[in-house]
Amino acid sequence: MTLPSATAVPGGRASSRRGSRAAGRERPAGSSATAGYFFVALYVGLLGLLGVAPVVYAIYLALSNSGGFGSSFVDAFKDYRFVPAFEHILAFMLIWLISQTILVVGLTLMLHTLAQRVGAVFRFLFYIPGALAGAASVVVWLFMLDPTASPFAFVLHWLGYAQFNNAIAPGNLSTIFAIMAFWTGAGGWIVVMYGALNNIPHELLESAQIDGANAFKTAFFIKLPLIRKWIVYMLVLSFAGGTQLFVEPTVLGSAALGVGVSKYWSPNQLAWFVASQYDNFAEAAALSVVLLVLGLFVAAVLVWRGRLFEAE
Amino acid sequence: MKSYLSPRFRALALSVAVVAVVAVTAGGSSASVRSASTKASSPPLVVWYDAARAAYVSEYKATHPHANIKWVLYSGDSNGDGTLQSKFALYNRVGWKAGVAPDVVFDEENYEAGWLGEPPFNDLLDLSKYIPKSVYSKDEGLGDCMINGKLLCLRNDNAANVLWVDTKLWSQFFPNQAPPTTWAQYASDGQALVKSHPGYYIGEFGQPWDAETYLWGNECPLNQAIGNSVLLDNPNSPNCTTIAHLIDSARDAFTKDGPFTTAWVNDKTAQHMVMDIGAIWQGGAIYPSGSGSEGPGTNVMEAYPPPVATNGAHVTGSIGGGLWMVTSHSKQPKAAAALVQYMVTSPKIQANPKITQGLPAYAPDQDAWLTSLDGVFANPKATEAAIKQAAGEIWTGWSPVPWSVESIFGNSVTPGLVAGGSFTSALQTLAGNIKSAAQSAGWQVKSKK
């Protein structure tokens, strides 16, 4: 899953950022431009090797099936595991993206009204669960969800789950993975959003205050519209990461000793399953291409609707 | 947060971070690359074995000190984790390089020869050309290996199901009565137990291998290959419905916890099992006292013959055990087959219960192994006779196929059963899911012969 920790945090207070920008503009082209090209070339090289080349190979594999042009896509769509896998991921995304967006933005706006030092402590606290990413977070949740071992067993018993198998019943899985993903990612996004809020010029907030806006009005009518692009950015990355859900259901499934979580719960797992268990790399590639198209489409809509690339 | 770094330094730091992230991501996928052995001029024989077979390897090394073999420990494909399928699929793409790709493989899943040896894999060697019939015909349970006329594996141990009875609890709860010999008696004993001693059990129910216990053991034709890629899948057969109905009639007498869960150990469930239908190896694996299993001790456990099927047939199911297979890409098929033959037949390995935990599949080694049970279980002579009887009664109509019934059962049936659904209604769900999996694997599915 894509983690916000790998993304750049919008830096510094407005004044210092503007300062460095100005300094960059003043700098003559020459040597720094060469260094710029060098580093961009490095990135483009790696992007080609590890990003574009696999995509091209996947499209080639998907189209070069022995059954005829495009037959691997027909196989994928007709696969009896295809629709359930996308239903699972759809339910997961709805729960996760909505709760993440509301809670991350809400918490950050609240944190931003606190004193700098208190806010920093909370940001750190929120970030801690994010340190347990991927498989490690699943292992923690295995204990949390087992009524015979969990420190929150009373909650599970109250919900009517006497056994681990009750807790991970198929109807609960989308919610469980959404909760896992939320705790893994939310802390990092709160840090990102907080950085974005710090970019809002002080004068703007001060003038809002002078005009009589209270904390709520400032948050809702001034701050929120100004970090809209960062919210869209979070949605784009989260959507791409979320549709590729793989580690969580795989680890949970093997830890449950084959009960409840199927090996093709998510589309990405299904792609792995048909490739590795039935030697059908063409159908797996077709599924990957479907995921890629879906991710690109949603990203395009979000970028366009959210006006992400428009200059300020 | 004020930045003290120059823009150029920041750009450098950022690129280093990006490269590091990419390197870490890429590194993860190459972790399974192994270094090839280069000491010998000809490539070594590569043998993949599981942890439970480590003692076999030491024994083989002791008796064959000069053998040029690369031993590779792997998961054994336990719980059908699919390791073999995924590795084989990759070798099929990149080529089976001698000395790197496996020649011999030990597999814990007893249906997988029908998966790896058939299309689209076709990766297993027909051993009948390399191992004499006089040898393999004495290997019991070959229904898992003899597929479309090809001998694709040898069975390591016989994992037939028997009726394990806790003699102490039995004589306490059912004085003056013998343990059940039919499924009907088994169910009625369960009903009686629920009334008189709630909290004690006659078996486990809701585990992925339930189909292999109750359906396989009653000749239920849900997973029966009746031709090349033709499956008989009939949940309406009386052989299926009668057993499901009997199990449902005594459901409260079954624990929902499997023997490999934390709940099983925490609740000392093994000490509450009055009886249990389970594989031969379960006697020594689940019931020992102390240690992690918290059982009553093997000395109170006695094996009885499995219940007679509701149609009167003397049959039983089989859970686990293991297979030795040779890959069809091996450059040294003779040496590989000889190693497999040694592992399966050598009395040094198979007749020694410290090395082989289940009943040897190879009949000539069975008596010596059984004698070694003296002093382990209650009434050793009766236990040894029951085990030997069950070993010869495995029904051959539950076929090795390219899908995992355990996996289907665990994912599609167990959740409903755990939530209180009936086995009778679950039969249709199970049959429907087996049908989908079979059709998706290119099989034709019939509901009548």
Image (tube, coloured by chain):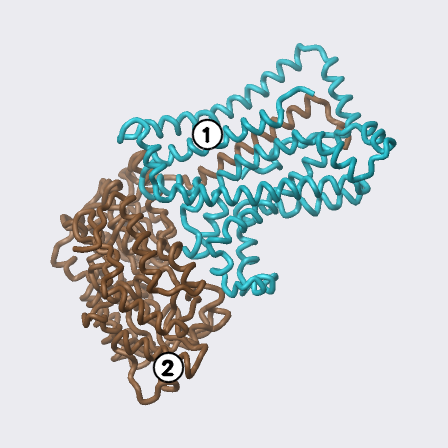
Q: Is residue A206 above or below residue A123?
A: above
Residue B367 left/right relative to B99: left
The three-letter code of the residue at mark 1 reads Val
* Residue B410 image position (x, y, % from top left): 39, 57
* Residue B105 image position (x, y, % from top left): 29, 49
The quarter of the picture where residue B439 lies is top left
- In the rendered image, the quadrant that contains the C terminus of chain B is bottom left
The quarter of the picture where residue B5 lies is top right
In the image, the chain rendered in cyan is: A
Label placed on residue B158: none
**Residue bearing mark 1:** A293
**Residue bearing mark 2:** B192
The three-letter code of the residue at mark 2 reads Ala
The quarter of the picture where residue B159 lies is bottom left
Palette colour of chain B: brown
* Residue A291 image position (x, y, % from top left): 45, 34
* Residue A57 image position (x, y, % from top left): 39, 27
User: Which residue sits at x=31%, y=76%?
Assistant: B186
Chain ID, mark 2: B
Q: Is residue B239 above or below residue A81?
A: below
Q: Is residue B41 above or below residue B340?
A: above
Please tell me which residue lies in front, A45 or B276: B276
